[in-house]
Image (cartoon, rainbow, N blue to C red):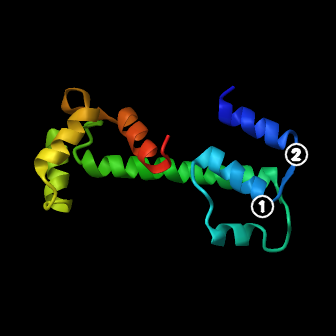
Amino acid sequence: MSNRYQFLKDLLGSKTYLNETEYIIYNVVYTGQVPNDAEINLMFFNANLISRKDANVIISKKLVDKESIVLETFRAFDTDCKGYIDTEDLKNAWKSTLPNLSWEILHNSFRQIAEDDVLDYKAFKIYFLSSIINI
């Protein structure tokens, strides 16, 4: 069992309801993000507790949304649906979105993460998510 899941088990045990602080911790451990004030206010508007089941539904939705964002972003680069991003895909995206950024800097950064100048979806997802949630 990973440390973060053991931490949750130690913190929450078999609780079926979470208070605001527990929900925030639960959310951070699973999504890597602190819920904003609007979400907290909505979740705890009429109650001091939320069911763990409801928390799981919300967190699952967030994780699904994150996956769709990754896939959508990948497809924006892989416009010809090859299943990977190569230097030509990167150059096309660069020309249309970041022409003021040095091509050399962008290309060198890409080469650090792309084996043989090719980045498949699995690798893209790892790097993309790590930049969002600081894995």
Name the spot of residue 101 as percent of width and height, x first: 16, 57
- Say whether residue 23 is visible: yes
Q: Which mark is residue 33?
A: none
Residue beneath disc 2: 15
Mark 2: which amino acid? Lys
> Circle 1 — which element?
helix
> Is the residue marked by circle 2 packed among few (<14), some (14-19), or many (20+) residues within 10 Å?
few
Q: What residue is rendered at 65% in x and 29% in y?
A: 2
Of the residues under marks 1 and 2, which one precedes in the sequence? Answer: 2
Q: Which of 40 and 87 lies nearest the eye of the viewer?
A: 40
Mark 1: which amino acid? Glu
Q: Which of 122 and 4 lies nearest the eye of the viewer?
A: 4
- Above-or-below relation of 103 to 82: below
Q: Nearer the viewer, mark 1 or mark 2?
A: 1
Q: Is residue 40 left or right of residue 87?
A: right
Name the spot of residue 73 as percent of width and height, x first: 35, 51
Q: Is residue 91 left or right of residue 120?
A: left
Q: What residue is rendered at 41% in x and 47% in y?
A: 131
The CA span between labels 1 and 2 is: 13 Å
Q: What residue is rendered at 50% in x and 48% in y?
A: 133
Residue beneath disc 1: 20
> Is the residue marked by circle 1 packed among few (<14), some (14-19), or many (20+) residues within 10 Å?
some
Q: Quadrant of the N terminus?
A: top right
